[in-house]
């Protein structure tokens, strides 16, 4: 009797594991389809204004999820600021769920407030994280001029890797 119970429990555990694997694979596939083209979004810009998918110029677009308190994001901010000339033919949209004041400080600290094609947006509703399936900060999505996803970087990335996607 004990052997039967153990076998049933083992079969149930294997079945549950199989269901979890299938659900994860389906989720991954759904997300890949969802972000294959730049998803539709609208964010408030910091310090003012709005930005939406429809008003982005047809340029290579870097969508960077960041947090001003993150050491890796500080590194990327410094590097983006130093290489701003190389990004003049691209659009850089930095999105954060952090408090508005800390985003404004970050933007000012790295001079993004003086670069016309660098935008900082606040997502106080946290809608962008599931939309792009962001699991870690920083995360960089690179879209081409036709808004197709070219590359995703999770975590800190060297500026040279980003520059290689600018035509």
Image (cartoon, helix red, strand yellow):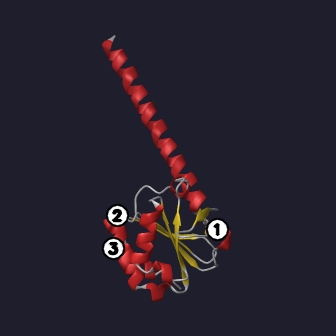
Horizontal relation, residue 36 to residue 151: left or right: right
In 3D space, how far apart are the residues under numbered discs 1 and 3 (Cα atoms)? Answer: 27 Å
Q: Which residue is mark 3?
A: 75
Q: Is residue 54 above or below residue 126?
A: below
At label 1, counting other C-alpha atoms closer than 10 Å, the crowd grade (few under 14, some 14-19, many 20 or more) is: few
Q: Residue furthest right?
A: 54
Question: Which is more N-terminal, label 3 or label 1?
Answer: 1
Nearer to the camera, 126 or 3: 126
Q: Residue at x 54, y 53 (%)?
A: 125
User: Element at badge 1?
Assistant: helix
Q: Is residue 155 above or below residue 29?
A: below
Q: Residue at x 47, y 58 (%)?
A: 97
Between marks 2 and 1 in the image, the one whose residue lies nearer the viewer = 2
Nearer to the camera, 150 or 55: 55
Q: Residue at x 37, y 21 (%)?
A: 7
Q: Is residue 152 above or below residue 162?
A: above
Q: Which residue is mark 2?
A: 70
Q: Which residue is mark 1?
A: 53
């Amino acid at each position: 009797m004990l052997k039967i119970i153990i076998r049933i429990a083992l079969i149930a555990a294997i079945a549950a594991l199989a269901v979890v694997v299938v659900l994860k694979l389906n989720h991954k596939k759904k997300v890949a389809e969802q972000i294959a083209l730049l998803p539709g979004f609208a964010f408030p810009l910091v310090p003012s204004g709005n930005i939406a998918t429809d008003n982005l110029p047809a340029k290579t677009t870097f969508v960077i999820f960041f947090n001003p308190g993150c050491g890796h994001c500080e590194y990327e901010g410094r590097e983006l600021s130093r290489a701003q000339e190389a990004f003049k033919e691209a659009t850089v949209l930095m999105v954060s769920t952090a408090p508005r004041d800390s985003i404004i400080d970050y933007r000012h600290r790295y001079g993004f407030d003086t670069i016309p094609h660098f935008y900082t947006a606040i997502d106080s509703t946290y809608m962008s994280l599931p939309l792009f399936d962001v699991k870690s900060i920083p995360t960089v999505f690179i879209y081409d001029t036709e808004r197709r996803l070219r590359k995703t970087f999770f975590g800190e990335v060297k500026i040279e890797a980003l520059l290689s996607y600018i035509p």
